[in-house]
Amino acid sequence: MRYSAFKSLLRVTSQKLTQWIIEREGLDVHFAVNGVEAVEKTRETSYSCVLMDCNLSVKDGLQATREIRERESVCGGKRLPIIAVTASAMSGDRKRCMDAGSKFSTTLNDTGL
């Protein structure tokens, strides 16, 4: 139970820090609470870029990315840049993110957080 609470606190802190950094550059930020919502938001809104958390609930970020890519292949148009973000730095994680259709993948270790 403690780990779950810590993980939730870390996720909220990471979101607030990410939001602050992006808004400081004059850009708008939208959050999705799970992968289903992330797919829906990209269907409803035209985004310049998506930072996709690989560990989203309900539907993980990899599956959400695959669904976005499938929709793009059917509908055509410009391919949305999706950057996979994960706290995990396990061997093979970056490849799984790229295989799902992410343009780039980064971990918290890459960012120094």
Image (cartoon, grey):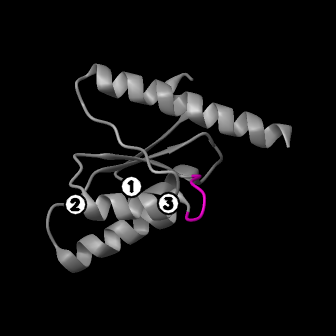
Distance, label 3 to label 1, CA atoms, is 14 Å
| Helix, strand or loop under label 3 | helix
Q: Earlier in the sequence, mark 2 or mark 1?
A: 2
Does the CB distance between marks 3 and 1 fall below 8 Å? Answer: no
Query: Which mark is drawn over residue 102?
Result: 1
Q: Is residue 91 above or below residue 100?
A: above
Residue at screen point 28% across, 46% down: 49
The answer to whether one can see residue 109 in this image is no
Question: Alpha-carbon neighbours of circle 1 within 10 Å: few (<14), some, or many (≥20)?
Answer: many
Say which residue label 3 marks. Answer: 35
| Helix, strand or loop under label 1 | loop
- For the magenta stretch, what is the residue range? 55-59
Location of residue 9 by image quarter: top right
The answer to if 58 sits in the magenta stretch is yes
Residue in the foreground of this view, choosing between 43 and 61: 43
Say which residue label 2 marks. Answer: 79
Q: How many marks?
A: 3
Residue at screen point 33% across, 37% down: 29
Question: Alpha-carbon neighbours of circle 3 within 10 Å: few (<14), some, or many (≥20)?
Answer: many
Of all residues, the one furthest to the left in this rendering is: 77
Q: Earlier in the sequence, mark 3 or mark 2?
A: 3
